[in-house]
Image (tube, rainbow, N blue to C red):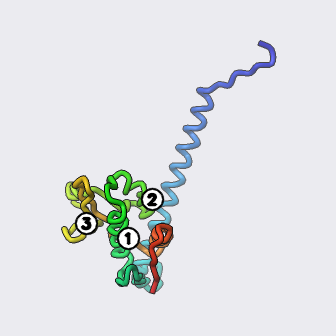
Amino acid sequence: MKGVHFMNYDRVIIELLDRISRLEEKTERLEKIIAQQSSSKVTGTDGTEPKTRDKTKYIIDGRTCLKNRLVLEVVKKYVAEHPGITFDELRDVFYDKLQGSFGVVRIKSDIEQQKQIRYFYRDADTITLDDGTKVVVSNQWGKDNIKAFVILAKSFGYEIQEI
């Protein structure tokens, strides 16, 4: 067959896997650098004054809350306004990367098994879905990841005021 060229797919796949591997390595190095810079800013190991914790407050539905409580209130409100929502649907709305490394919502029994304390896990803070699933909300929020969360919450029509 004159003029027809066949690609060597094995070679292309190997090259792509190699590129992915190099990108993963670069990402790991960048994450380590960022983590080191973040810890030095918090602890002051670079000779500067340690930064104070951001204690920005927000008002939602007449209640004043810190960042982590704002997230809890928004998720509770969303669940109340969407009866019958499943955990998977809730997790699709409040997707993991919105928070970062821990995710926004988790099933309470999964967190208890992992003995994690990065979630609101007291009974008063636990959200029970209509199917009986008990859900906990991350309490790990900083000035950087809260911004995207507030934008998402406002897209639901929720009025949130930063004070």
Farthest right residue?
Answer: 3
Graded by Cα atoms within 10 Å as few (under 14), some (14 to 19) or many (20 or more), the crowding at tag 3 reads few
Q: Quadrant of residue 43?
A: bottom left
Mark 1 and mark 3 lie on one chain; the one further toward the N terminus is 1
Which mark is on residue 97? 2
Residue at 32% x, 52% y: name it: 86
**Is residue 15 depicted above or below 2 in this figure?**
below
Q: Amino acid at mark 2?
A: Lys
Residue 52's place in the image compared with 67, above or below, is below
The reply to whether callout 3 and callout 2 are in contact (CB within 8 Å) is: no
Q: Is residue 36 above or below residue 53?
A: above
Between residue 128 and residue 121, name the one nearer to us: 128
The residue carrying pointer 2 sits among few (fewer than 14), some (14 to 19) or many (20 or more) residues within 10 Å by Cα, namely few
User: Gap between marks 1 and 3, in whole Å?
Assistant: 20 Å
Query: Percent position (x, y) of residue 74?
Result: 37, 70
Tag 2 secondary structure: helix
Query: What type is the residue that disc 1 sits on?
Result: Val
* Sequence-first disc among 3 and 2: 2
In the displayed structure image, the side of residue 126 where residue 87 appears, left or right: right
- Mark 3, mark 2: which one is toward the viewer? 2
| Quadrant the C terminus occupies | bottom left
**Does 80 appear above or below 85?**
below
Q: Which mark is residue 117?
A: 3
Foreground pick, 70 / 54: 70
The residue lying at 41 percent from left, 58 percent from top is 96
Q: What is the crowding at mark 1: few (fewer than 14 residues within 10 Å), some, or many (at least 20)?
A: many
Name the one closer to the observer, 21 or 147: 147
Q: Position of residue 56 (x, y in %)?
A: 42, 83
Amino acid type at mark 3:
Ile
Of tags 1 and 3, which is closer to the observer? 1
Q: Which residue is mark 1?
A: 74
Of labels 2 and 1, earlier in sequence is 1
